[in-house]
Image (spheres, helix red, strand yellow):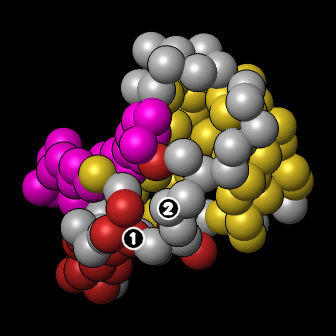
Amino acid sequence: MNKWLFYKGLFLSGWLFFASCEGNTDFNWLLENESSFVIEAEYGRTFEGDTLLSVVDPGSSIVMSTTSKLGGDPSPNLPSSTFNYFLVINESGDTLQIDMMDPNQWDVDIEERSRIPSDFLHTYRMIITDDDF
């Protein structure tokens, strides 16, 4: 009887240890205005199910979305997994000419914060300049 309780306790301890090693991945999506104009950015977010309108001054940036998921994941994410659409215009009324849904348009930084449990921080930056209009 004591042997059975010992193995049961050992199994439960091991299960709790490995269950706590799930890890996490955080995603931050930033829009940086390096143009000489004030810009307005309208974007639809998939997870939140909303549409936001942000005004971004020259030399400023905004956080468009911050999400997390269980499990450490070093693979880059696609903009379409977080956003439905983008519309960016400057104060002169010019529309942004680059496709923000194209993953190649984003600067991506993936930082491994911890190995066990696996924990990653993904930072995606869209840097807008005068030449993008």
Instruction: List x then y, in percent, for residue 127.
Output: 39, 40
Disc 2 vs disc 1: Cβ atoms closer than 8 Å?
no
**Considering the numbered disc 1 on the image, is that residue within a helix, a strand or a loop?**
helix
In the image shown, does 80 or 110 lie closer to the viewer?
80
Earlier sequence position, callout 2 versus callout 1? 2
Tell me if 41 is positioned left or right of 80 in this view. Answer: right
Q: Is residue 74 above or below residue 94?
A: below
Q: Amino acid at mark 1?
A: Pro
Dot 1 alpha-carbon crowd within 10 angstroms: few under 14, some 14 to 19, many 20 or more: some
The spot of residue 23 in percent (x, y) is: 33, 59
In the structure shown, which secondary structural element does the residue marked by tag 2 occupy? loop
The residue indicated by pointer 1 is 103
Which image quadrant: the N terminus? Answer: bottom left
Q: Residue at x 16, y 50 (%)?
A: 112
Q: Quadrant of residue 54?
A: top right
Residue 82, numbered label? none
Q: State the residue position of label 2.
A: 98
**Residue for point 78% across, 58% down:** 44
Front residue (pair 45, 104): 104
Question: Magenta span covers which residues?
Answer: 108-131
Based on the picture, tell me whether residue 125 belongs to the magenta stretch: yes
Residue 5 locus on image (x, y percent): 33, 76
Q: Residue at x 68, y 50 (%)?
A: 95
Decide which of 26, 40 is in the foreground and name it. Answer: 40
Nearer the camera: disc 2 or disc 1:
2
- Magenta stretch: dominant SS? strand
What amino acid does circle 2 point to? Ile
Observer able to see residue 104 = yes
Callout 2 environment at 10 Å: few (<14), some (14 to 19), or many (20+)? Answer: few
